[in-house]
Amino acid sequence: MQRAALLDAARSLLSEGGTEALTFPALAERTGLARSSVYEYFRSRAAVVEELCAVDFPVWAAEVEAAMAAADGPEAKIEAYVRQQLALVGDRRHRAVVAISASELDAGAREKIRAAHGGLVTMIADALGEMGHREPRLTAMLLQGVVDAAVRRIELGAAEDPAAITETAVAMALRGVRG
């Protein structure tokens, strides 16, 4: 129960203040634990982020997969892939996943996260294969780059409305995969 409370507190801290807000003193304060007790559960801030990703990324990926499964045809699947990821930007679980890029993770943790992320790329590569792309995996990785850029724009609180960022990313994705 304490571990779950710490993870929930970490989600809140990430959502409210980004990775800088995720500190052991802040976790201790949010959960009512002594700072030394936090170290009993996690050896470092990177370990907190790694566990959040291990817990939250599969749920997040399942939501993207469900949106794609509900779509009819490969182009609709690609649109659902982009829209669902951008819709999840405001979700606290998504904040933990986004924190990966800004955190000091060790090589093992980064590899686990890359492998999990590869599942998303595989999902979209299948839809691109259905469209006849000669290099669906490469195209999928580049498409994910468009999504990642849109996520960063939304996360930064860019001047554009998040809905405008989403519509632009969807249009770029669909135009790009149509060739």
Image (cartoon, rainbow, N blue to C red):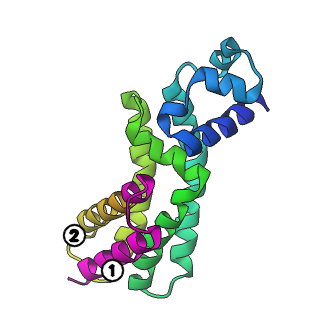
* Residue at the spot of label 2: 135
- Badge nearest the viewer, 1 or 2: 1
Residue at 25%, 84% (x, y): give it. 178
Query: Who comes first in sequence, dot 1 or dot 2?
Result: 2
The quarter in which the N terminus is drawn is top right
Camera-side residue of 154 and 83? 154
Image spot of residue 137 (x, y percent): 28, 64
Image spot of residue 179 (x, y percent): 20, 82
Residue 34 inside the magenta-drawn segment: no
Furthest residue to the front? 159
The three-letter amino acid code for the residue at tag 2 is Glu
- Depicted 95 relative to depicted 84: above or below: above
Tell me which secondary structure the magenta stretch mostly adopts.
helix
- Depicted 30 relative to depicted 166: above or below: above
Camera-side residue of 82 and 135? 82
Residue 163 inside the magenta-drawn segment: yes
Residue at 39%, 27% (x, y): give it. 106
Q: Which element carries disc 2, helix, strand or loop?
A: loop
Residue 59 marker: none
Quadrant in the rendering for residue 151? bottom left
Q: For this view, does 90 lie left or right of residue 75? A: right
* Residue at the spot of label 1: 171
For the magenta stretch, what is the residue range? 151-179
Cα–Cα gap, marks 1 and 2: 21 Å
